[in-house]
């Protein structure tokens, strides 16, 4: 199926034929069908592919590096090259055996929504620029608002992800509680809080010492009594406590901070309470998730990522602010050439975040909820929770394996602890198990540190993962662990480890 490039070439020089950068209808359709075939092949054959695929820049440059093309190239060759050299050289976050970091299971309806919104080149920054799209964004936000339990006056906006959601939330908190003056102000969180918080606060003019990371309890949750004591101590020193960031699902263990107790402290102390639910708050679609997230409705702002546990393609984040006016007055956009947009009573989404030109991210969540129904989301989330429980039950049945953190919001951590090895060697061994397993290409897990010890972590939110695949992963990890152990007890671990 070759693209008819002759006409495209001719048109570069002729005003009477097609305009530049234009294709005829038949060609567009043929290209579209071929692209959709590529996506469907990926989705239906993904299990045959390695999960982790990393080549060196030099190797990739060898096959991909080419000068700027002056002439059109054949579409079939291009898409074939993309399939072979680009899409097979990415780590498949949507692979059913990808358990590392936070998987991005994605879904086909969401991908189609991206095609549609790009095809129509929707501008969702102002009401006059995209009224229909803005209305869909409002409707989708309203669904989320009700699930979260925020009051009717709450407002939100879709954005790039958890990092940007945190930035928008912190800017709002700084504005409302500090009048934008960060001098001597302090933010509190647990030592399990995502690092994007520090970068966001740095961007907003805070110094590293203004972010207080408090040690967690034995379940990796913020300790309210420690928080209250630290706030009192800081006030006594003349500092300005203004914000607490709680985790609604930490990346490391899935733990949820004691939301109700911290909310009470924040109410008493007049502090802004932000919940980082980038990972875990997606679970509001399912009953077990809502139960664990009880108290989330009390926070002032909440970040939650549709591109994580709401199964949307990258990228899709969302921030919601309890008092919508706080968000609007922080970001409201005013420029002479934009006066026209102010004539509308309807919301302009550029007033709710940092983008003026905005794409239509809400569509993918809206579309996939419409195509599959919220019950399917609930079932998919319950499945992820169940898979983590299967991991926990299975891993402890294997000799010398121990659970470190129990399954919480579909995250579970464990460790291989055979006898006779000191802590340093055990850490090195667990890292080596992960590296060796990932190199097999069968699946992907990560290691992380908990209580200064290296642990293996799995995040099981992909609803397409089969029980048998969990079993296989754990058996392979066990086999690798015991092989390495046998090697290591007779020889020293390699110096590089
Ligand atoms: C708890 C948490 N917060 C924030 C982030 C940052 O989100 P993003 O990568 O979408 O910017 C992540 C990413 O994994 C996360 O797990």
Image (cartoon, helix red, strand yellow):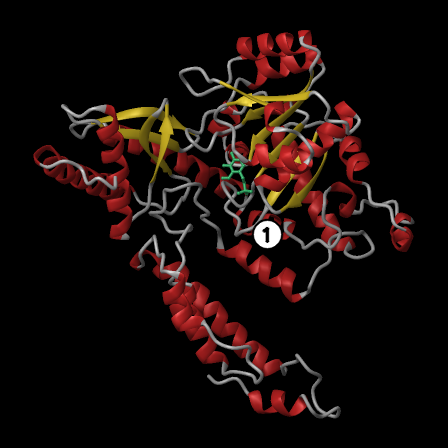
Q: Residue at x 67, y 6 (%)?
A: 236
Q: Nearer the viewer, residue 237 or 458?
A: 237
Quadrant (top left, top right, bottom left, bottom right) of the C terminus:
top left
Disc 1 packing (10 Å; few <14; some 14–19; many ≥20): many
Give left or right: position of 364 versus 80.
right
Q: Residue at x 38, y 69 (%)?
A: 84
Q: Quadrant of residue 20?
A: bottom right
Is residue 442 in view? no
Position in image of residue 106 (x %, y %): 48, 50
Position in image of residue 332 (x %, y %): 82, 41
Q: Is residue 10 above or below residue 188?
A: below
Q: Residue at x 49, y 52 (%)?
A: 107
Q: Residue at x 62, y 87 (%)?
A: 8
Which residue appears farthest toward the front when viewing the image? Answer: 495
Give left or right: position of 287 versus 56.
right
Position in image of residue 258 (x %, y %): 53, 17
Q: Quadrant of residue 430?
A: top left
Q: Is residue 222 above or below residue 309?
A: above
Is residue 266 in view? yes
Q: Nearer the viewer, residue 266 or 149?
A: 266
Position in image of residue 82 (x %, y %): 44, 70
Question: Which residue, given by chain and number where applicable, does mark 1 sit on?
Answer: 364
Give left or right: position of 400 versus 316.
left
SS class, disc 1: helix
Q: Is residue 333 above or below residue 47?
A: above
């Amino acid at each position: 199926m070759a693209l008819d490039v002759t006409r495209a070439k001719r048109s570069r020089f002729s005003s009477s034929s097609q305009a530049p950068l234009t294709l005829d209808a038949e060609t567009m359709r043929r290209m579209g069908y071929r692209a959709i075939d590529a996506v469907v092949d990926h989705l239906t054959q993904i299990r045959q592919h390695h999960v982790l695929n990393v080549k060196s820049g030099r190797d990739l440059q060898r096959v991909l590096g080419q000068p700027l093309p002056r002439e059109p190239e054949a579409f079939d060759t291009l898409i074939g090259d993309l399939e072979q050299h680009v899409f097979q050289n990415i780590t498949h976050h949507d692979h059913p055996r990808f358990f590392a970091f936070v998987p991005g299971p994605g879904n086909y309806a969401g991908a189609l929504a991206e095609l549609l919104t790009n095809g129509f080149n929707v501008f969702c920054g102002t009401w006059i620029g995209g009224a229909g799209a803005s209305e869909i964004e409002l409707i989708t936000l309203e669904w989320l608002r009700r699930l979260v339990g925020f009051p009717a006056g709450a407002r939100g906006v879709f954005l790039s992800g958890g990092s940007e959601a945190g930035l928008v939330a912190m800017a709002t908190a700084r504005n409302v509680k500090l009048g934008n003056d960060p001098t001597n102000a302090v933010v509190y969180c647990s030592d399990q809080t995502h690092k994007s918080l520090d970068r966001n606060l740095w961007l907003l003019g805070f110094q590293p010492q203004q972010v207080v990371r408090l040690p967690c309890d034995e379940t990796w949750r913020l300790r309210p009594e420690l928080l209250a004591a630290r706030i009192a101590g800081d006030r006594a020193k003349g500092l300005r406590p203004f914000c607490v960031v709680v985790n609604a699902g930490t990346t490391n263990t899935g733990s949820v901070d004691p939301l109700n107790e911290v909310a009470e402290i924040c109410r008493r102390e007049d502090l802004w309470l932000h919940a980082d639910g980038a990972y875990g708050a997606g679970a509001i679609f399912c009953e077990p998730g809502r139960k664990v997230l009880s108290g989330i409705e009390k926070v002032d702002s909440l970040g939650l990522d549709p591109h994580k546990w709401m199964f949307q393609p990258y990228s899709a984040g969302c921030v919601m602010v309890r008092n919508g006016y706080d968000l609007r007055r922080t970001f409201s956009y005013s420029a002479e050439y934009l006066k026209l947009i102010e004539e509308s009573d309807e919301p302009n989404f550029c007033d709710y975040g940092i983008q003026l030109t905005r794409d239509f991210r809400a569509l993918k969540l809206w579309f996939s909820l419409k195509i599959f129904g919220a019950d399917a989301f609930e079932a998919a989330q319950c499945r992820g929770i169940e898979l983590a429980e299967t991991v926990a039950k299975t891993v402890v049945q294997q000799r010398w394996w121990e659970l470190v953190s129990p399954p919480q919001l579909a995250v579970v951590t464990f460790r291989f602890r055979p006898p006779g090895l000191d802590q340093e060697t055990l850490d090195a061994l667990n890292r080596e198990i992960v590296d060796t397993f990932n190199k097999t290409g069968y699946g992907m897990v990560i290691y992380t540190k908990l209580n200064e010890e290296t642990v293996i972590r799995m995040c099981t939110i992909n609803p397409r993962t089969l029980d048998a695949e969990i079993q296989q992963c754990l058996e392979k990890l066990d086999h690798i662990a015991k092989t390495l152990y046998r090697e290591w007890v007779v020889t020293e671990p390699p110096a590089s480890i």
